[in-house]
Every structure is written in C-alpha cells, then in structure tokens.
Amino acid sequence: MFVDRVLVKVEAGTGGSGQTSFRREKYVPMGGPDGGDGGRGGDVLVRADRNLTTLLDYTYRDSWKAERGQHGEGSNRTGRSGDDIVLPVPPGTVVRDADTNELIGEVLEHGDSLLVAKGGRGGKGNAFFVTATHQSPREWQPGEEGQLRTLELELKLIADVGLVGQPNAGKSTLLSVISAARPKIADYPFTTLSPNLGVVPLSDHRSFVVADIPGIIEGAHEGKGLGLQFLRHIERTRMLAFILPIDADDWQAELDQLRHEIAAYSAALAAKPYCVVFSKLDLLGEHYIPDIEAPGAFGLFAISAPGRMGLDVLLDAWWRQLLAMRVAAEQPERDAQLLP
C-alpha cells in the first residue's frame, strides 16, 4: 500500500530534575552542597532512509516519545541524558506542524536529519546556587518539559523524469518495459492508483529514475479524479514527459489540457523542461510523429513500449537532457571558483 501523508504525535523527553545534596565525608566537618544537575531529555528527529518508499509504518503507530533525562545525584554527578528517538522516512519527505501548518523542513538525501521536537533542559542541582553569602543552598530546579507536537509527514517522490498523461495513456506499460518496476496494467481507466518509481539502466553504468503518476484529468488541480492527490509527486521531478496515445481524438487538445492542469497547480512545475511522447505506435504499424505545437519542448518522440519501438532514441534523449541540466546547474559553481 502506498501511503504518502500521515499525522504523528511526537514528544521529546523531559529533562531530569536537579538534586539537593550535601557532602558527608569523614573528617570533613563542613561538607558543602554537591547536588548535580539533571540530564537533558531526548530529542525527536526525522531521518531520510533510502530503503523506504512509503509512510505506511506510521499508520500502525502514530505516537512516539523520546526518553526523559535522569535526575541529578550527589557528589556533583549529572544525570544521564535521555536517548534521542529517530523516525525513518523516505527521502523527499516534508515535515509540517499540523496545528500551525508551519513548515519545519524536509529531508531529501539519504541520511539527512531534521530536529522536530527538542528535549527539555535538565534542572540545576543545589551546588549551582552556592554564593559567598549563601553557603548551604537547598534550591533545585525541575527539568524542563520536552516539546510536544503533532506532525504532518508528506512524501513527495524524487525522480529525474515524471510521466504525465491521461488515464490509459500507456505510462505504466512504458515504465514496466524500461525498468524493473511492475505497476498494475489493465485496459480500464485509473488502473494506477498510486505513483510508481523505476530505475532505468543504461550502458556504462548510467541510470536515472522515472516516476509514473496516476492519470491526470481535466480539473485535477481542483481535486477532480486522483490528480490533486498525486500532482505533488511531480514537483520534485527534474523534467516532465507528456504521454499522448497515438489513437487520441485530438492530440493538441489533450496536450494543452495536461499542460494547463500542471500550470494551474504550480507555475514552477510548468517551467520545468518537458518533451512529448506519443505512445501505442504499434497501433499504426509504422513510425509516425504527429504535427503538434509544443513550445519549448526539447523533443517529440513516438514509441511502442510492448514492441520496443523508438525506446532507445527516447531514453538517449532523456539522458542527454538530464546531463545538460546537470552541467548547467554546476556552471555557476565553476564560475565562482574562477573569481579572484
């Protein structure tokens, strides 16, 4: 089951209380205060784990609490700090405070950590309150309470290429042929009910990630169909591939409608590089690319996934575009290094 949005309650550990204690030692008639401080409460962290692809685990357990700090002890011994608790999530997870809708942060790469609830500070023991005029203090501080929060975890898939198209456009079939992914494929609309990721292997140890997004219909940005639920997964893709079946009634209208839904959802998403891919070429039995207006597209392609027609050209074009984007992104860094 693909789960990409959950609510979890987290509570950081409470700090330990300070201790009131006085030295009791043979032959030391004026033993002074020696109460130690309490330990710090454990923090709650969210950490990206590339072995996870869904937030399903948090539907079984939605409450997490870090360990509290131990109380201070005599002989100026500080209490042990509580252990932190780590919530593993898939890379690409966004964390918000569910009560205020405040964006806390996001974890994008494997190992990235985000502090979401801070443990309480330990209280001071009576040794802390000694002054020249107050030699035998009995004051002590309780530990601070740990931070309590309700978090919204939202997963946005990270991929190089996002496949966008109406239901039954051939997106899942294409993904199943070019990668090891095995999405559900059937001859009825909305077969794909959740996004699928696939790693596309090329020669010379090259590879990139492709995401198959559930069918986008008119009004998807307003919540119609499954579009609004999964459009956010296209946000992190580096480029888009609009899939149009070769037997569509009006290729231009279908492309315009898809691009309109993307632009209505996010202007930044609409500005990403894109190409147009005509699928189901086997229905014609010959190679044919319809005449269509696609301003700014880096290519028009026609393929048959089951017949593997045109796939090599398409994958090579995707790789060259990704490589060009990578070089363009690194150019400012190289220019900065050349500056005196």
Image (cartoon, helix red, strand yellow):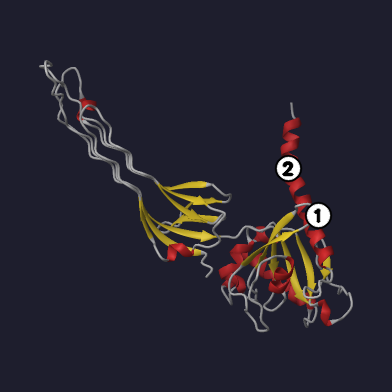
Rendering coords of residue 38 (x, y %): 27, 36
Residue depicted at x 59% and y 77%:
225
Rendering coords of residue 29 (x, y %): 10, 16
Residue depicted at x 41% and y 60%:
8
Rendering coords of residue 78 (x, y %): 28, 32
Q: Nearer the viewer, residue 293 or 288?
A: 288
Q: Quadrant of residue 169?
A: bottom right
Instruction: Tell me if label 1 and label 2 are in contact, CB under 8 Å.
Output: no
The crowding category of the residue bearing disc 1, from other C-alpha atoms within 10 Å (few below 14, some 14 to 19, many at least 20), is few
> Residue 253 shows which numbered tag?
none
Q: Secondary structure at mark 2?
A: helix
Q: CA distance from mark 1 to mark 2?
A: 15 Å
Q: Is residue 219 left or right of residue 76?
A: right
Query: Where 129 sits versus 72, above or below?
Result: above
Which numbered disc, 1 or 2, marks the residue that appears first in the sequence?
A: 1
Residue depicted at x 79% and y 52%:
204
Q: Is residue 321 left or right of residue 121?
A: right
Q: Secondary structure at mark 1?
A: helix
Rendering coords of residue 331 (x, y %): 76, 41
Q: Which residue is mark 2?
A: 330
Type of residue at label 1?
A: Arg
Q: Which residue is mark 1?
A: 320
Q: Is residue 112 left or right of residue 63?
A: right
Q: Is residue 119 visible?
A: no
The crowding category of the residue bearing disc 2, from other C-alpha atoms within 10 Å (few below 14, some 14 to 19, many at least 20), is few
Residue depicted at x 64% and y 67%:
264
Q: Quadrant of the C terminus?
A: top right
Q: Nearer the viewer, residue 199 or 141?
A: 199
Type of residue at label 2?
A: Glu
Query: Where 89 sits versus 165, above or below?
Result: above
Q: Nearer the viewer, residue 175 or 325?
A: 175
